[in-house]
Amino acid sequence: MGTNYYRVPKVDEVNSRFQKLHIRLQEMDRWNPGEIQRGYCSITNPESQWENLNPWEELTEGMSVHLGKRSGGWKFSWNFHKNKYYSNKEELLKFIRSGRVVDEYGVEQPVEEFIEMALNWCVDGWDTKTYYERNPTTHYVDYTKYHDIYVDGLRVLSSTEFS
């Protein structure tokens, strides 16, 4: 059993996003059959015609970003989202501090307390490699396929799917 943690925006960022949503809704041609057919999606990245978002998706994109998971006996598992929001420890900490932290139950955590907990959680605990090396008969999984990556001393899972 473990606990997942998420970065959510501060109140002023949420308010700014809602103001943009309100403006976008006022400006859209809501009766246009082409817009209706496309689900009111518009190209949000001109370099890629495949990144279409509707106004609600524009509001919620990146609103809740999974930071990682704490599990008993295991080192903290960070989620780097394939470097979408941050790619090293310094960027990660800046990203966390730019918002708020909530656990999977919706309980807000003080940012600095979360950082302290996550950086110090079970530092001598398991990671995928040591677990399967020390427990070779345990429901064997090719850990090299699902290996942990270490970035600036942080255990980062190669998968972005957490449970």
Image (cartoon, helix red, strand yellow):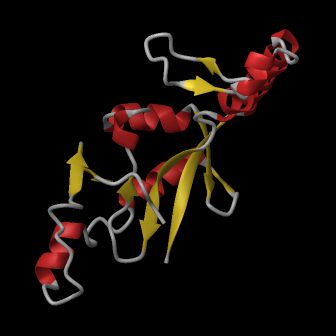
In the rendered view, tell whether residue 14 sits above or below residue 69: above
Residue 101 in the figure: left or right of residue 24 = left
Q: In which quarter of the image is residue 59?
A: top right
Q: Which residue lies furthest to the bottom in this view?
A: 137
Residue shown at 78% from the left, 24% from the top: 36
Q: Which residue is more in the foreground, 161 or 14? A: 161
Residue shown at 43% from the left, 57% from the top: 161
Q: Position of residue 48 (x, y in %)?
A: 45, 17
Q: In which quarter of the image is residue 5?
A: bottom right
Residue shown at 43% from the left, 11% from the top: 47
Q: Count of labels shown?
A: 0
Q: In which quarter of the image is residue 155?
A: bottom left
Q: Which residue is more in the foreground, 144 or 30? A: 30
The answer to whether residue 127 is seen in the rendering is yes
In the rendered view, tell whether residue 156 sits above or below residue 26: below
Q: Position of residue 25 (x, y in %)?
A: 83, 18
Q: Where is residue 10 in the image (x, y as percent from the top left)?
A: 69, 33
Q: Where is residue 114 in the image (x, y as percent from the top left)?
A: 52, 53
Residue 102 in the figure: left or right of residue 123 = right
Residue shown at 63% from the left, 37% from the top: 63
Residue 39 in the figure: left or right of residue 1 = right
Q: Which residue is more in the foreground, 92 or 140? A: 140
The answer to whether residue 13 is seen in the rendering is no
Residue 155 in the figure: left or right of residue 91 = left
